[in-house]
Amino acid sequence: WNIPQSIASNEIMVQAAADRYYLANKNINVYEKGKKIENPETINWATESRTSRKYTFKQQSGVSNALGKIKFLFPNRSSVYLHDTPAKAAFGYTMRAVSHGCVRLEHPLELAHTLFGDGSQYEQIEKDMQDSIPKARYLSLPKKVPVYITYITCWFENGRLIFKPDVYGLDTVLYTHIQKMLS
């Protein structure tokens, strides 16, 4: 996956500055003007400007890939994916807002089966999910499927109003829009 600039600046470059082999260990390639840098461990990441867009980063498939073994792309402006994760323990946390905005799937194979149904494409996905390092491939759905992501911090359940923390700070934005509509 192509690592977004914000993650590259705030995390990847910081880790690379602390450990010169971090990029190799995480299977991350570094590019400058679209050309792969063969020995990124020779770059002094501590002195590189993190606001510069000089470098781009791409994590290859493998066990350390942050998106796991499968990702589902859908049109959106924010580079958000639905994806597998190697961090399965996060599904046991009470507070699971641990990603950068993408949606981690606890059961990505079930979603793949729902989307593709039985057949050769799903069988290929099943096979790939069993491989320790699946081959990168792109599969298209036979028809478009709308994706709706809803963020809810308050709802009515069993006669009670339930409130949960607004971990993304979106309630303030919603409140501002409602106030504008009412005035």
Image (spheres, rainbow, N blue to C red):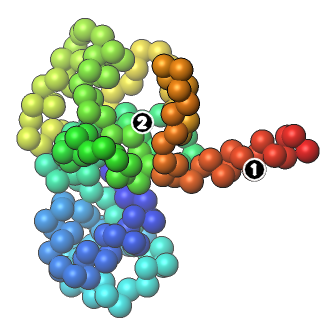
Please state, as top left, top right, bottom left or bottom right, where the C terminus lies in the image: top right
Specify the farthest residue to the front: 159
In front here: 60 or 89?
89
Q: Is residue 182 visible?
A: yes
- Circle 1: residue type: Thr
Sequence-wise, which precedes: disc 2 or disc 1?
Answer: 2
In front here: 109 or 106?
106
Residue pictured at 28% horizontal, 88% vertical? 44
Q: Quadrant of residue 8?
A: bottom left
Mark 1: few, some, or many residues within 10 Å (few <14, many ≥20)? few
Q: Which residue is mark 1?
A: 176
Specify the farthest residue to the right: 183
- Is 70 drawn above or below residue 119 in the view shown? below
Q: CA distance from mark 2 to mark 1?
A: 31 Å
Give the x, y percent position of residue 128. Answer: 15, 31
Q: Secondary structure at mark 2?
A: loop
- Is 39 drawn above or below residue 133 in the view shown? below
- Circle 2: residue type: Leu
Q: Which residue is mark 2?
A: 73
Give the x, y percent position of residue 92. Answer: 22, 41
Give the x, y percent position of residue 59. Answer: 27, 56
Mark 2: few, some, or many residues within 10 Å (few <14, many ≥20)? few
Q: Is residue 61 visible?
A: no
Specify the farthest residue to the bottom: 47
Q: Is residue 72 left or right of residue 160?
A: left
Q: Is residue 123 left or right of residue 97?
A: left
- Is 136 drawn above or below residue 64 in the view shown? above
Q: Secondary structure at mark 1?
A: helix
